[in-house]
Image (tube, rainbow, N blue to C red):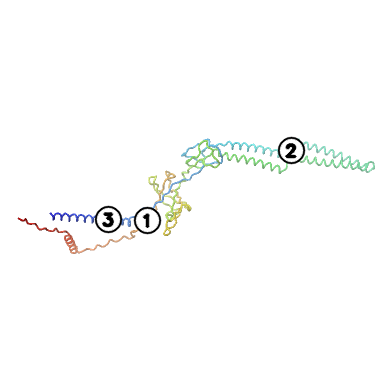
């Protein structure tokens, strides 16, 4: 009975020791596999994720007013010159009426000045001149007679002087009448004519200014594209320069990447790279870089350690597709795979030569196997024989 118990205990111990050895072997194998994967397996490639964009044009006008009607909806395709929206402004219409009235008034004043005095005024000045001439002739004859009489001693010097004064007055009146007649014939001064003409131009400029504002009463598409977004609703008031809608130029698509400076070595100006578009069934296409610019200090990656690292700035990189990709829409994700990093234990260019296998002597191998079997046999526990008890009779 005791012999059986000892045999069972030895078998249990053998099983436990074998299980421990197996677990140890498994752990060692797992560690070796992990170490081999860390040393020999390639790391996944770095990716830079970008986004497809397109040039957008904001449609706005100089006319403040109320939106009466939209002629397009969001998503519609438009051509350059298509009418998009109607904006009405009663204030602008009133300004136009005022400007036109001012233009008519100044034009009339300018015409009046250019025409000069009326014919009746000119004729009246002429008649006054003739009257003054006749008075001068009579005064001259009277003075001559008085002078002759004074020389003959018939009249006094006083009478002669009175005749002389009347003659001088008549001559002055004739000269004044001649000047009035000449002024009536000449019309306004040249400065007055220039001023009147300038006022006409000012009035015309006012009309043109209001017309320029009213040109935006009907806003048209500035380019070919697609209506991306409409901001106001019908009936709302819009101010000067407020955007009414945006037009998306689908023929001017580009891709934007935000790249840290250490990756710029793979994305050079005018360089061509291959990108992947996940939304288009992982389609691959080539793009050409045309713009690289620093995004500013707000996009700077700050190092968290005092030593061993440095601040890295972020750059905006833009590229255009070399091939036409009509299904590429703004907002789609675009992925660029950087060059895969080399493994820590990379193979050399020359292939390693296979190691030489030393041929062991067959006799030495047999002796080693026999020794190993003997050692194993010696380690097996030997069951002790217990003496049998004799029956006492």
In 3D space, how far apart are the residues under numbered discs 3 and 2 (Cα atoms)?
A: 123 Å
Give the quadrant of residue 345.
Answer: bottom left
Q: Look at the picture and state if 316 lies above or below 107.
A: below
Q: Residue at x 37, y 56 (%)?
A: 341
What is the x, y in percent for residue 339?
39, 54
Mark 2, secondary structure of its residue? loop
For the residue labelled by badge 3, is the local secondary structure a helix, a strand or a loop? Answer: helix
Label 3 neighbourhood size at 10 Å, few (<14), some (14-19), many (20+)? few
Report the residue marked by disc 3: 27
Nearer to us of marks 1 and 2 is: 1
Of the image marks 3 and 2, the number of the one nearer the N terminus: 3
Image quadrant holding the C terminus, namely: bottom left
Relative image position of residue 199 (x, y in whole percent): 67, 41
User: Disc 3 or disc 2, which is closer to the eye?
Assistant: 3
* First along the sequence among labels 1 and 2: 2
Of badges 1 and 3, the one in the foreground is 3
Q: Residue 376: x, y in percent?
A: 18, 60
Query: Is 254 placed left or right of 195 in the picture?
Result: left
Residue located at (74% from left, 38% from top): 117
The residue lying at 27 percent from left, 55 percent from top is 27
Q: Are marks 3 and 2 in contact (CB under 8 Å)?
A: no
Q: Which mark is residue 174?
A: none
In this figure, which residue is indicated by the disc labeled 2?
Answer: 117
Q: Which mark is residue 341?
A: 1
């Amino acid at each position: 009975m005791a012999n059986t118990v000892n045999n069972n205990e030895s078998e249990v111990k053998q099983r436990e020791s074998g299980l421990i050895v197996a677990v140890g072997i498994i752990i060692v194998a797992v560690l070796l596999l992990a170490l081999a994967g860390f040393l020999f397996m390639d790391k996944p490639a770095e990716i830079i994720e970008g986004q497809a964009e397109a040039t957008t044009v904001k449609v706005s006008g100089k006319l403040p007013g109320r939106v009466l009607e939209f002629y397009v909806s969001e998503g519609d395709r438009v051509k350059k010159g298509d009418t998009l929206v109607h904006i009405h402004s009663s204030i602008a219409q009133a300004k136009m009426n005022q400007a036109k009235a001012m233009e008519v008034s100044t034009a009339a004043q300018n015409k009046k000045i250019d025409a000069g005095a009326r014919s009746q005024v000119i004729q009246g000045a002429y008649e006054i001149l003739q009257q003054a001439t006749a008075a001068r002739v009579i005064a001259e004859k009277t003075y001559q007679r008085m002078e002759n009489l004074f020389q003959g001693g018939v009249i006094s010097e006083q009478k002669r002087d009175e005749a002389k004064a009347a003659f001088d007055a008549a001559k002055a009146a004739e000269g004044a009448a001649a000047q009035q007649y000449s002024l009536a014939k000449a019309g306004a001064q040249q400065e007055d004519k220039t001023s009147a003409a300038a006022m006409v131009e000012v009035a015309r400029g006012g009309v043109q200014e209001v017309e320029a504002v009213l040109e935006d009463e009907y806003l048209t598409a500035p380019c070919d594209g697609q209506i991306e977004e409409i901001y106001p609703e019908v009936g709302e008031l819009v101010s000067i320069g407020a955007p009414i809608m945006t037009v998306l130029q689908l023929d001017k698509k580009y891709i934007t990447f935000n790249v840290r400076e250490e990756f710029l070595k793979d994305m050079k100006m005018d360089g061509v790279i291959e990108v992947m578009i996940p939304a288009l069934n992982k389609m691959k296409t080539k793009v050409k870089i045309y713009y690289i610019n620093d995004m500013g200090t707000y996009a700077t990656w700050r190092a968290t350690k005092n030593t061993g690292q440095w601040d890295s700035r972020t750059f905006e990189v833009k590229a255009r597709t070399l091939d036409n990709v009509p299904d590429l829409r703004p907002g789609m994700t675009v992925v660029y795979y950087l060059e895969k990093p080399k493994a820590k234990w990379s193979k050399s260019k020359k292939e390693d030569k296979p190691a030489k296998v030393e041929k062991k002597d067959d006799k030495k191998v047999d002796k080693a196997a026999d020794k190993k079997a003997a050692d194993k046999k010696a380690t097996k526990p030997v069951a002790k024989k217990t003496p049998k008890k004799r029956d006492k009779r």
